[in-house]
Image: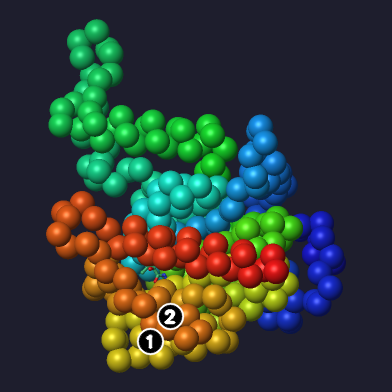
Amino acid sequence: MDSRNGSVSETPLDAEIESFFDSAPPLKDSAGIIKKLKEFIEYNSTPPGKGSPRRVVCVTSGGTTVPLEQRCVRYIDNFSSGHRGATSIEYFIKAGYAVIFLYRRGTFQPYCQSLPEDPLLECFECSDDSTIQVRQPHTEAVKRAVSDHHAAIAGGHLLKLPFTTIFEYLQILQSIAMSMKDLGSLAVFYLAAAVSDFYVPWKSMAEHKIQSASGPLDMRLVQVPKMLSALKKEWAPMAFCISFKLETDSKILLEKAEMALKKYRMHMVVANELSTRKEVVTVVTGNEKILVCRDKTRADSDVEEPLIELIVGRHSAYIKDSDL
Ligand code: PAZ
C-alpha cells in the first residue's frame, strides 16, 4: 500500500525506490497537490460541452537540488535553465494538450521568452500618481506573456507545480503519474528535467550547517534510484513516455540514449549535447534516429517547435494503436 497516494500497487516498488520514498522528508501540502491534480485531470477528461477528453502531458523542467544539510544551507545543483520545458509547453498547449508543469522554482516559465532577464524591474515604471505602467519596448511582450499565461491557467489547460529538491521532484512526479494512470494512452510524460544522479539520504544527512573547522569534507552520496522503471511499469503503464539524455561527449550520446530507451522501455529518448541543445536534438526510437533542428532561417525559431510536432504525431499513432 502506498499510503501517500492512498492507492494500492499490485507489484511492490523495488526495495531501493521504496526506501527512497520512505526516508524522504514529508512533502509539504501533499494532500493539496493530489487534490489539484485530481480536479485538473477530471476537468480535462470531461471538458465542458460535448468536447472529447483532452490529452494530458506532464512536462518536467529545470534541475533538482541535492541538499547537504536537513536545515539546508548548502546544496548541489546543476546547469538546467528550464528553457526546454517552458518553451515546449507553449507548443503542447497550441496542439490542444492540457499540461501539468513540474518545474524547478525560479526557472524559465512558458510565454515569458521575450521578456528581459529581470521583468519586474525592467518592464514596469511608476508614474508620479503611483500608477504602474509597462515601459516601451516591452509592451507587446508583457501583453503576450500575461494574456497567454492567464488564458492557459483560467482555461484549465495548465497546472503548475514547483519543486526544488530531488525529494520534492520525485514525490510530486509519483503523485502526478498515479493521478494520470486512468488516462491510459492519452497521458504523456515529457521528462526534460535534469534530475540528480546522486543524493544524500535524509537519515544520514547532517541536521545543522556543516562546520568548516572540522577540516576537509568527506561525504558519501548514494545513487538516486531510477524511477523511470517504476513510472513505466507501475505508476502509469499505458502512458506515452519521452525521456531526455544529455551528454557533453558526443561520442557516447546516442549509445547512452539507446540504452535508456531499451532499459526503461521509453517510447522516445531525446538526445542532446550541452553546447548545442538549443539548435539540434536527436530523437531515438526503437528503429530510428531522427535529427530535429531549429529553423536557422528564422531568428525567433526554436528546436522545440519541430520536436513537439514530431511527438504529437507519434503520440496520435500510439493512441490509434492502443485503441485497436
Ligand atoms: O533546461 P535547459 O533548457 O537549460 O536544458 C534542457 C536539458 C538539457 C536539461 C534537457 O534537454 C535534458 O536533456 N534533460 C535531461 C538531462 C539528463 O540527462 O539528465
Q: Is residue 293 left or right of residue 217?
A: left
Task: Tell me where residue 242 appears, x and y as whole percent.
Answer: 51, 70
Q: Quadrant of the C terminus?
A: bottom right
Residue 254 - label:
1
Numbered disc 1: secondary structure = helix
Given the current orientation, which residue lies at the most extreme front position?
324
Residue at image position (65%, 45%) is 52
Label 1, label 2: how far apart the Cα atoms are:
8 Å
Residue 217 seen by the camera: no
Q: Is residue 213 left or right of residue 10?
A: left
Q: Which quadrant would residue 120 be assigned to in this image?
A: top left
Q: Label 1 is placed on what type of residue?
A: Leu
Q: Label 2 is placed on what type of residue?
A: Val
Task: Tell me where residue 94 appears, x and y as whole percent.
Answer: 43, 46
Image quarter where ligand 1 lies:
bottom left
Residue, disc 2: 284
Disc 1 to disc 2: CB gap under 8 Å: yes
Q: Is residue 306 above or below residue 283?
A: above
Q: Which quadrant would residue 249 be assigned to in this image?
A: bottom left
Tell us which disc is closer to us: 1 or 2: 2
